[in-house]
Image (spheres, helix red, strand yellow):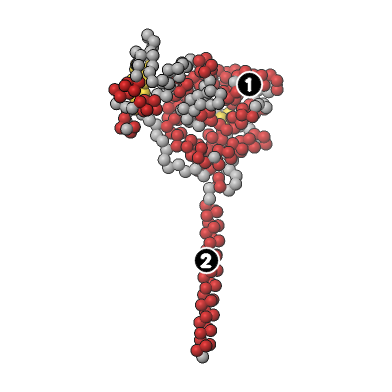
Amino acid sequence: MKDKSKYTLLLLAVGLLVIGQVRAIMHDRGQGKNEEASAPASLAGDVYFPERLALAGEEAPLWRQDVAESLRRELIVNTYFHSHTIQLLKNVPRYFARIEPILREEGVPDDFKYLAVVESALNPLAVSRAGAVGLWQFLKSSAREHGLEVNDEVDERYHLEKATRAACSYLKKARERFGSWSMAAAAYNTGEKNIARQVELQQETGYYDLLLAEETNRYVFRLLALKQIIEHPTLYGFRVPVEYPAEEFEEHEINCSIDNLATFAREKGISYKTLKRFNPWLRASSVSVPPGKVYRVAIPKNKNAYH
């Protein structure tokens, strides 16, 4: 009887162990399905694709196979380039707060704030291999054509407000010449001469009908994709709880040369580093001011935030 009882208890223990293992496996499988169901669309191997999308009121012909594939490519690239896109989303409030009012004043559609995103990733110190600099990536020649001062001490390509107005000037001129904002954006990327040459060669006048260089072929689609992701980040799996706010500042006029900007900064209650942060267009440690010329230097309102 004792041996039989021991055998029965052993069978009971083994049975309970097997039941426990089965329950654990079923729980893990169910948990996996729940996690899969709650995963953002961006982790499913493709991206959310909008039914309609427009640039400056001009609807992109997404019903076309070539157009849809080009846009999807840029949505995928920027959705899965996580570190880059997260940094963009953090910077958007800071720079859009300053760009948007200027676009309105200049009569340029609000969507062109995304052109600055494409050009520089909202890095005010960006420098390209070709020598284009600033948020709007002006070359020296085109900058001077649109009224920006560029020399060893002052480079207004780094001046957010003035460079934004110069970009507006370029875009309005290009739109008037080529008839659409999408063509103006393409011209901003590759130059008006190149666009005019391809229009004549291919006998087409619309961006979506032209065969252009690889970078320009992707340019407007990249702009549209970034607009879509920035306006609807959660559709692409992005949740950015900490965004960088606009930095408030006061402008101080200087109408005479300054031999030592570090001394000037200390007199204003900030460091040389902070002075350059707010005024990256000051390219040297001094600045010469010709007679009759006035520069406006930005000084942060909350100086304690930079000490």
> In percent of the image, x 38 and y 13: which residue is there?
289
> In percent of the image, x 51 and y 85: which residue is there?
6
| Mark 1 or 2, nearer chain start | 2
Q: Position of residue 219 (x, y in %)?
A: 59, 29
Q: Secondary structure at mark 1?
A: helix
> In percent of the image, x 52 and y 88: which residue is there?
3
Q: Amino acid at mark 2?
A: Ala
Q: Quadrant of the C terminus?
A: top left
Q: Position of residue 120 (x, y in %)?
A: 51, 29
Residue 195 badge: 1
Visible residue check, residue 136 = no
Q: Amino acid at mark 1?
A: Ile
Q: Position of residue 71 (x, y in %)?
A: 61, 36
* Residue under label 2: 24
**Mark 1 and mark 2 residues within 8 Å of each other at the beta carbon:** no
Locate residue 220: give its quadrant: top right
Give left or right: position of 42 versus 101.
Answer: right
The answer to which of 109 and 165 lies nearer the viewer is 165
Locate residue 156: give its quadrant: top left
